[in-house]
Image (cartoon, helix red, strand yellow):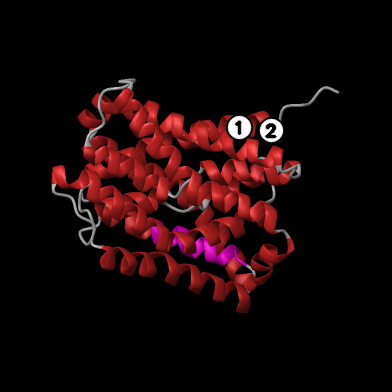
Amino acid sequence: MNAIFIVLPILTLLMFDLGLTLKPQDFRLIAQRPKPIIIGLIGQIILLPLIAWCIISLSSSLSLTSSLSPLFIIGIMLVACSPGGSSSNVFSMLAKGDVALSVTLTACSSIITLFTLPLIMAWVTSGVGEAVDIHLPIGNLLIQNIVLMVVPISIGFIVNIYRSDAAEKIHNVLKRIAMPALVLLVTIFFIQHKETIVREFASLGLAMTLLILSTTGCGALLSWLLKLTTKERRTLVIEIGMQNAAQAITIACSPLIFNNEVIAIPAIIYALMMNLILLVYVGITKLPINH
């Protein structure tokens, strides 16, 4: 089974669901509370790709893991360049964070990465893609992201403006479908690429775990240095650490772009480690604090 036929509807539903949760006042947060939004976007758009590239370079130069193949390097950078995941809104709620801030950051990063992702990935593929004959058709990438992300987000946003009652009902259904659908996708990928995943898990698992821990740590440090509230700090830790793995998988598998499921393997491992680590973080936020 070609994973693209599963991941396409999943990504579209996730983006439509994100649109259903958006309200005009979410965008007014940019003017009302610019500091946490700017910090969050710097973490997602700038720090994540930089940290990912440092981890790739470090793992190769110090031989901390087996040498990462060009396809895996492209896959790791693809995850790092993706926008925030819509599941971050649920994790922010569970961690008693700032859900409105989470929604705003996810929406803003989804728009900004329409432009930053092609630029960064064009640089990455020009450097390492030649060895495996991988090239980035930037026009196709832009068109696909607009169709699969901007359009469903916009439709969901419009539905929420004019039919907020219906939007809430649809959202309540979709948020229950999203996680089982992602689990199905991961299961199918694992079955199809079991040997590769098992063989490369030591190197990729370490790289992805380092990426998540480094980025969430940066989010916590920046929030603390700039004296954000506890709710804002928890949200930024989650937002900076949780990327849209479904989009990375879609780009990797799409016949219009990379058409290579091996490139999607880092995103699959990232999704697994990301959920495990952030579930632990949510659990820590619920621990009683002794004064």
- Give the SS element for disc 1: helix
Q: Position of residue 98 (x, y in %)?
A: 69, 50
User: Residue at the spot x=45%, y=29% of the render?
Assistant: 210
Count residues near mark 1 (Cα–Cα under 10 Å), then give few for <14, some for 14-19, many for 20+.
some
Amino acid at pointer 1:
Tyr
Question: x, y (%) of residue 159?
Answer: 56, 75
The picture places residue 274, in percent across and down from the top left corner, at 47, 36
Q: Quadrant of residue 27?
A: bottom right
Which residues, given as a range, are shown in magenta? 11-22
Is 169 above or below relative to 131?
below
The front one of 62 and 15 is 62
Tag 2 residue: 285
Please say if the residues under marks 2 and 1 sit with CB atoms less than 8 Å apart.
yes
Residue 282: say if magenta. Answer: no
- Residue density around tag 2, few if under 14, some if 14–19, many if 20 or more, within 10 Å: some
Q: Is residue 175 above or below residue 168?
A: above
Left or right, residue 157 beside residue 27:
left
Residue 21 drawn in magenta: yes
**Whole-percent x and y of residue 134?**
18, 50
Of residues 29 and 193, the one drawn nearer to the viewer in this rendering: 29
From where the camera sits, is residue 6 visible? no
Q: Quadrant of the C terminus?
A: top right
Q: Which mark is residue 281?
A: 1
Q: Secondary structure at mark 2?
A: helix
Relative to 261, is 184 on the left or the right? right
